[in-house]
Amino acid sequence: MVEFLFTTKEGLVGNVIEAIGGGVSALAGIYVWDKLMGPVNQFLSKWLGNYGGPITAFVLSLLMLHIARSQEGMLGRFLQVMAYSMFGDAIAKSLGIDPVMVPLGIEVQNVSPWSTLEPVPLPAR
Amino acid sequence: MSNSVPAYVTLTGPQPTVFIVTFTISANASAGTVIQGNIQAFGALMPASTVVQVPITEVWSIVDFYTLSTYSPDAQIQLLINGYPQNIYPTLNSVYINNYKKWTLHQAIKIPPASTWSVNIVLLAANGSSAQTYTLYISAIRAPYVVTK
């Protein structure tokens, strides 16, 4: 049964499973880029400037796609989508668009300063 | 429509509010007397209390202290958060709203989620022969707490 669900490309079940799998691996890709590759990105940005993020992501995505090609089935698909989303996330970040990842608690954008413990300067009277 | 389910009401965004704190000064109270304030934090329908706990889902930011009249004898205001005196000691008369050089905060005092806080005053001189009540207003913003990285 499991084999059928993951190997079939036909029919509704296959498409739904594929969409869910794609979503999960996209989230995983963004998470990996955010948490694990963040320091690598920062390190390389010293030499590459603002292009550090996209360039690193592109190189890493190519590497992952290369690995993905040699993997059949689920793992290959997973790595492929991860690679694409890592690259997409890095491009988005370099353009100043941060994806809102509330469900995973990774990224929260446009939070009111009243809602955090960060200091809020008050206007002089 | 009948049988509608009552909605759970909660804070969804920053909301300005004013806490009213009253201090009862007994007759002939000596200089240095510490008086704990009774804080009306959740509106007129809820009883005032000497210690207020911030809901665990919220963060409160104090933006101003003020009084609507001057008081004699003057008293020093102490704000305590989780039992720790905060590093501000304005006097009641320095926060009087019509004071030209009114004492102001340069940045909001944040009261973290689930913290308890209280306000007391220290009399700077002895009180006269009749008891009196001082009222201090604290402007604050209540907001839902959001965890950021």
Image (tube, rainbow, N blue to C red):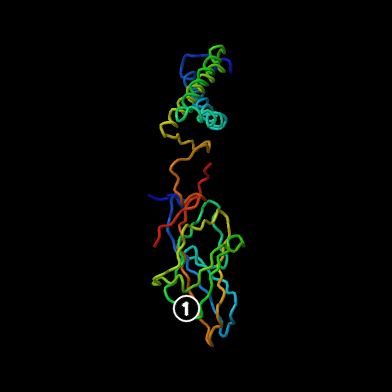
Q: Is residue B137 left or right of residue A72?
A: left
- Residue at the limit of the structure toward the bottom, as seen here: B129
Q: Using the image, determine if residue B50 lies above or below residue B142.
A: below
Mark 1 neighbour density, 10 Å: few (under 14) some (14–19) many (20 or more): some
Query: Which chain's residue wears label 1?
Result: B
Q: Is residue B28 left or right of residue A52?
A: right
Q: Using the image, determine if residue A68 lies above or below residue B12.
A: above
Q: Nearer the viewer, residue A77 or B5?
A: A77
Q: Nearer the viewer, residue A93 or B7?
A: A93
On the rendered image, what quadrant is the C terminus of chain A found in?
bottom left
- Residue at the limit of the structure toward the left, as seen here: B1
* Residue B114 position in % (x across, y down): 57, 55
Q: Is residue A1 left or right of residue B46?
A: right
- Residue at the limit of the structure toward the right, as seen here: B83
- Residue at the limit of the structure toward the front, as seen here: A47
* Residue A10 position in % (x across, y down): 47, 14
* Residue A102 position in % (x across, y down): 49, 38
**Residue type, numbered disc 1:** Tyr
On the rendered image, what quadrant is the N terminus of chain A found in?
top right
**Numbered disc total:** 1
| Residue at numbered disc 1 | B71
The quadrant holding residue B117 is bottom right
Residue visible at 54% across and 71% down in the picture: B37
Secondary structure at numbered mark 1: loop
The quadrant holding residue B103 is bottom left
Q: Using the image, determine if residue A56 lies above or below residue B28.
A: above
Q: Nearer the viewer, residue A12 or B38?
A: B38
* Residue B55 position in % (x across, y down): 54, 55
